[in-house]
Image: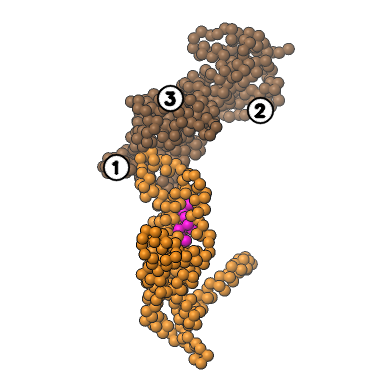
Chain colours: A orange, B brown
Amino acid sequence: MRHVYGWLLLTPAAILLIAFTHFPTLATVYESLFSKGSTIRPSRFTGFSNYESMMEDPVFWKVLTNNFWFAVGTIPLSVGLAIAMALLVNRTLPGRSLLRLAYFTPTILPMIAVANIWLFFYSPDIGLIDQILGSFGIAGHNWLGDPDTVLPAIILMTVWKEAGFFMIFYLAALQHFPEELEEAATLEGASRWYYFRRVVFPLLMPTTLFVLINAVLNSFKLVDHLFVLTKGGPNNASNLLLYYIYENAFSYFDTNYAATLTVVLLVILAVLALAQFFFLDRRIHYR
Amino acid sequence: MTDIRVNRLVKQWDSIRAVDGVSFTAEAGTLTVLLGPSGCGKSTILRMIAGLESVDDGEVRIGGRNVTRRDPAKRGISMVFQSYALFPHLDVRENILFGLKVRRVDVAERESRLAEAAHMVGLEGLLDRRPAQLSGGQRQRTALARTIVAKQPVCLMDEPLSNLDAKLRAEMRDEIRQLQRRLDLTMIYVTHDQTEAMSMADQVILLRRGKIEQTGTPEELYENPLSDFVARFLGTPAMNLLPVSAVEGATAKHVKAAFLGIRPEKLRICDAGMPVEVSAADYMGAETILRMQYGDCTLMARIEGRSRARQGDRLHIAWDENDAHLFDKDGKRLGGESLSHGPTDDTVRSGITAFRASP
C-alpha cells in the first residue's frame, strides 16, 4: 500500500519530467540515426551516417571552435567580475543598494532587449563606441561586420549580461560570512589580498561551482542575442552550436541532422557538468 | 612588561555614547575582567583596545606606547572571539598557524610553536581535523592555541566561554587562568557572567551604560559595593535591597539612607526578628534558597544544608549590623569605605540593629 502512495506522489513530477525531458532526449538520439525525409524520399534508418557527415561538416567544426572561445572568453571574465562586484557592494558604502541594483539591471533585461541596446553600441560610425572613439580621432569600425571582432564583441556583451547575475550568488554567500573571520585575519596582519586568497575565495568555492556550471550551460544555451545581432555571421564567425542547431532544424528543415548536433551538445554539457562536479567537489569545503 | 592604560575612552554611535569616558589600567601580567550587562559597552571597549573599532576620543596605551590610531596587527595583541573565528575550511593546524604564516615566521619556528601550543591545550592528534569536526571545547582550545603561538604580550578575550555548556565552562575558566599565569599575559576578559569575573579576575571593572560603576578586586566589589547596582550584580541570589522606611527602627539615625542591602547568606533564621512568610524553598543540595515575603518586599536567604522551612511557613529573620550595606536614594553607598577596613561609622549603622519583632 505504501508503495502505491509513494508512486502516486511521484507521478505528477515524473509525468512532466518524462514528457518534456527524458522522452525528448531519447527521441533525439533515435531521430539522429535516420536520414532526412522528404515527400518523395521518406526518412530511413542510416545508422551513424549523420554523425559521419557531421565530422566532415566544416561549419560544425567552426561553430564548435567558436563555442569553445565563447566559453573561454565569457566564463572566467564574468565570474571574476562577479566576485569583484560582490566584494565591492558587500562593504558599507554610500548608495550601496543603488549600486547593487545597477549591477543587477542587465540580468533583469530580456536578452533580446539587451542585444538591441548593444546593436546600437556596436553600429559602425553612428554607434556609441565609434562615436566615443571618433572624439579621440580613431576611425569607425564595423564591429559586428568584421569576422575578427564579431566574436569578441559578443563575448563582451555576454560578460556584461552575466556578471550581474552571478554577482547575486556571490553577494548572498558573502553575507553569510561572519565578520570575526576578517577581524581575526586583520589582527594577525593579513592583507586584504591574503585574506581573500586564503579565506574568502576558498569559502566561496561552493558558490563558484554552482556559478561555473551555470556559466558553462549558459555559454551553450544563450543564443537569443545572435538572432538580433549577427544571425551567426559574417561567414559563421559568430555562429554557436545551439544557433547552428536552430538553423538546421528550422531554416534548412533537416531535423535529423539537428538531432545529431543536439546529441553532441548534450554529451558536451553532461561531460562538462560531471567533470566540474568530480574535479571541484573534492576540493570544496561545504559548511 | 606590557601594561594597558585606557584613558577617557569615548565611543559615540549617533546620539548614544556607548562608551563614555572610561579610564582604567590593566597591570602587566594580570587578568582584568570587563563585566557588565549586555549593552554596557564592554565589548566595544575591548574592540577599541584591539583596534577593530575606531576611537572617538581618549587614548589607548599598550606597554607605554600610544596605540590609539595604530594598525591592529601592530599593537602586540592577540584575541579570542566569542564565536572563536576559526576558518572553517582550514584544519586545526592551519588555523593555529594562520597568523604565523601571515607574519612569515620560518618553518622550524612555526612547527615548534605549534607543537608547544598543541601540547599546552591538549590538541595533539586533532591537528588534521576541521573545525566542524571538533566539539565546542576543542574549538575553544584551537582559538586559545592561536593566541599562544602568536606570542603577543597582551591577550584580549571577548566572552570566550559563552558558547560552552556549564561544566565545560568551569573547566575552561581554570585553563584560561592557568594559561594567563603561565605565559605571564596581560589579559583583558569581557564577560557578562559574574561567576567568571569573581573566579578569574585580578581586577574587575564593572560597567553600566558606558561608564565604570566600580573598579577593584572581586573581594572589594563583593564586600564593599559602591552602589546598589554593583551590589545587585555580583552574587547569586542577588543582594536583598529593602527600603529603609519599611524596616523597623532603621530610619531614625541616618536621614540619607534610603535602602538597606543584605546578602542572602548573611540572613539568619531566628526566634525573634523580622517576620516573613516563606513563598518558595529551593533545595540545591549543599544549600537551600528561601524566597520570603516581607510586606511588598521579596527577600532571598541562603541557608546551609537542608532547610525545614516550607512554603507558607512564617519565620523570623535577623542579621548582624556589620553585614548591612546602606545606600542613599540614588543608590550610592553611604559610609561605604569603612565597612571592610578602618573604623566603623557609628552614625550610619547604629540605627540598623538586629531586628526585634514588630508589634
Label 3 residue SS: strand
Which residue lies under the disc numbered 1? Answer: B104
> Are dots 3 and 1 on a single chain?
yes
Q: Is the stretch drawn in magenta largely helix, strand or loop?
A: helix
Of residues B92 and A84, the one nearer the viewer is: A84
Quadrant assignment, res B116: top left
Mark whose residue sits in front, 2 or 3: 3
The amino acid on which the numbered mark 3 sits, given as a three-letter code, is Asn
Residue A61 x, y percent position in the rendering: 37, 76
Which residue lies under the disc numbered 2? Answer: B280
Residue B106 x, y percent position in the rendering: 27, 42
Residue B181 within the segment the image draws in magenta = no
Residue that appears at 65% across and 11% down: B251
Q: Residue furthest bottom?
A: A40
Q: Give yes or no for contact between labels 2 and 3 (Cβ–Cβ under 8 Å).
A: no
Q: CA distance from mark 2 to mark 1?
A: 62 Å
Which residue lies under the disc numbered 3? Answer: B7
Which residue range is magenta in the image? A161-171
Q: CA distance from mark 2 to mark 3?
A: 47 Å
Mark 1 nearby-residue class (10 Å; few <14, some 14–19, many ≥20): few
